[in-house]
Image: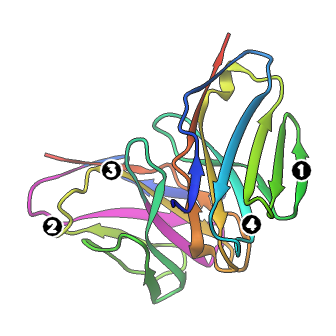
Amino acid sequence: QKEVEQNSGPLSVPEGAIASLNCTYSDRGSQSFFWYRQYSGKSPELIMSIYSNGDKEDGRFTAQLNKASQYVSLLIRDSQPSDSATYLCAVNRDNYGQNFVFGPGTRLSVLP
Amino acid sequence: DGGITQSPKYLFRKEGQNVTLSCEQNLNHDAMYWYRQDPGQGLRLIYYSQIVNDFQKGDIAEGYSVSREKKESFPLTVTSAQKNPTAFYLCASSMLGGGETQYFGPGTRLLVL
């Protein structure tokens, strides 16, 4: 089993819809969770971090964490064509930064 | 402007050649990292460093070497022992401690001639 799994997509949603991106992880000791957005040919940029069970909202983005189910998700409300990118889920397995593990990413396409 | 810079943007390597990728940060971060990204794959950790003059191997260190002589700089050398070096190389940095966010530089794309 891979450590961090994501549906590779592409996930296509119409403009204005809600995009739902999912990520599962295998290490129950994982402490911190991050969503990065990566445009084609560019480096990842942080969207959200989440550390506790439940929801965390920032503008059009909501991260959801369920440690019991080892599941973290990202919802994008009112999706825009500019949201079209690959979304990487990253999991920090312990208190040391070097233990970031990245998923393969989900490619999102928002159709005008 | 605070940030992470990487150079060059594109790098071409000939067979049997060592090449060095530059990474500099002015964020006063203690920890720095090198990742490799292949098409359609996630990032894989090559090396990381938490303090000057100390660094640790990541998951795919074979064929690579690093140094950390200054807090701001963490250059990566791709040696001739790395047989499949074509990839997108990303440098990141963070504060020390649990749960700290890693911030990325713009990346270097390495191609083999």
- Secondary structure of residue under mark 2: loop
Q: Name the disc covering residue B80, or none.
A: 2
x and y percent of residue A96 in the render?
64, 80
Write down the residue under mark 1. Answer: A56
Q: CA distance from mark 4 to mark 2?
A: 36 Å
Is there a contact, CB below 8 Å, between mark 3 and mark 1?
Answer: no
Say which amino acid is labelled 1. Answer: Lys
Write down the residue under mark 3. Answer: B87
Tell me: A64 left or right of A24. right
- Secondary structure of residue under mark 3: strand
Q: CA distance from mark 3 to mark 1?
A: 34 Å
Tell me: A72 left or right of B32. right
Say which amino acid is labelled 2. Answer: Ser
Is there a contact, CB below 8 Å, between mark 4 and mark 2?
Answer: no
Write down the residue under mark 4. Answer: A32
Tell me: B54 left or right of A30. left
* Residue in view at x 68 percent, y 79 percent: B96
Is there a contact, CB below 8 Å, between mark 4 and mark 1?
Answer: no
Residue A104 falls inside the magenta stretch: no
- Say which chain tag 4 marks: A
* Residue in view at x 38 percent, y 42 percent: B39
Say which amino acid is labelled 4. Answer: Ser
x and y percent of residue B30 in the render?
62, 79
- Report the front residue among A61 and A66: A66
- Say which chain tag 3 marks: B
Q: Earlier along the polypeptide chain: callout 4 or callout 1?
A: 4
* Viewport quadrant of the C terminus of chain B: top left
* Residue in view at x 67 percent, y 24 percent: A82
Q: CA distance from mark 4 to mark 1?
A: 13 Å
Q: CA distance from mark 3 to mark 4?
A: 27 Å
Read off the magenta span. Answer: B12-35
- Which image quadrant for residue B27? bottom right
